[in-house]
Image (cartoon, grey):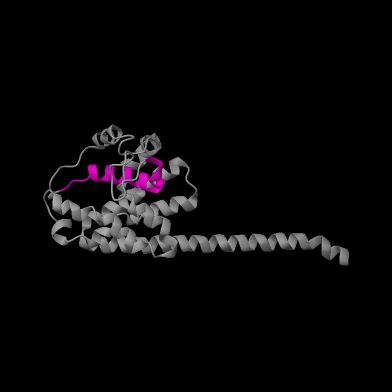
Amino acid sequence: MQAATMTTRPTDDAEELETLRYRFMEMEDRYRKQALAMACALVSLVDLRDAYTGSHSSRVAGYVRAMGLRMGLPDAQLDNVVMAALLHDIGKIGVPDHVLLKPGRLTEEEFGHIRKHPELGWMALKNIEDFKSISLMVLHHHERMDGAGYPGGLKGSAIPLGSRIIAVADSYDALTTNRPYRSARTKQQAVDELLRCVDTQFDARVLNAFWDASISEALKEEKKSNVC
C-alpha cells in the first residue's frame, strides 16, 4: 500500500506543477491585457486633444509589433516595445496647444517645445514600477545612430533597441500621413527616405526587418496593424 502511494506521488506533483504553471500563464496574460488596455486609455486621452497623435501612436505600435515579430524578439520584450510605441508621444500632452495644434510649419522656438515631449513622456512614466524600461524607450525614440538626435545625443547601440525600432515606425507613419503643411508621401517614397538614412538616423538591422516582404505586406493593411 505504501509502495503504491510512493509510485503515484511523482505524477501528482507533476500535475500540481502543471496546474500552477497554467495559472501563472493565465495571470501573466491577464496582466498584459490590462497593461495594454491602460496604455490604450492613455492614448485615447491624447486623441481627445490631438486626433493625429492618438491615431498615429496606434499605427506605430502596429508596425512595431510586426517588426519585432520579424526580428524574433521574446514575447515579454516585444510587449514592452509595443507598449512604448503606443506611449511614445504621450509627452505631447505637455506641449502648448498653440504649438501642438498649429496647422503650419513650426518656428525654431516652437519646435523647441516639441523636442521636450520625449522627456515629458519619460517623466510621466518613469515612476510606474513596471514601466521603467518602457519609459526609457519613450525617452530615446528621437535619438539617431550618428548621435545627432535628442534628448541625450546617444549613439549606436547605446540607444535602447526598442527606441531604434520605434524610430523607424514613427518616421514611416509620419511620412505617409497627410499633414496641413504637406501631402503624404507614397509608401515607396517613404521607404526610400528611410533607406537613405540608414546608419545615420536608423539602425540597419531594424530597417532590414522593416524591409522584409512579410512586413511590407503588414504595412499595406494599416487598419489591421492598429493595436488599440
Measured from the top left, where is residue 177 in percent x and y? 22, 45
Give the left or right position of residue 176, taking residue 105 as reference. right
Residue 205 within the magenta-colored segment of the rendering:
no
Q: Residue at x 25, y 35 (%)?
A: 193
Q: Quadrant of the N terminus?
A: bottom right
Residue 177 within the magenta-colored segment of the rendering:
yes
In terms of depth relative to the viewer, which is nearer, 194 or 178? 194
Helix, strand or loop for the magenta stretch, by majority:
helix
In the rendered image of this protein, does residue 218 appear above or below residue 33?
above
- How many marks on residues? 0
Observer able to see residue 88: yes
Q: Residue at x 19, y 42 (%)?
A: 184
Please report the bounds of the magenta region as a residue range: 156-179
Residue 183 position by quadrant: top left
Give the left or right position of residue 191, taking residue 83 as reference. left
Observer able to see residue 90: no
Measured from the top left, where is residue 145 in percent x and y? 34, 40
In terms of depth relative to the viewer, which is nearer, 149 or 194? 149
Measured from the top left, where is residue 125 in percent x and y? 36, 62
Residue 116 position by quadrant: bottom left
Residue 228 position by quadrant: bottom left
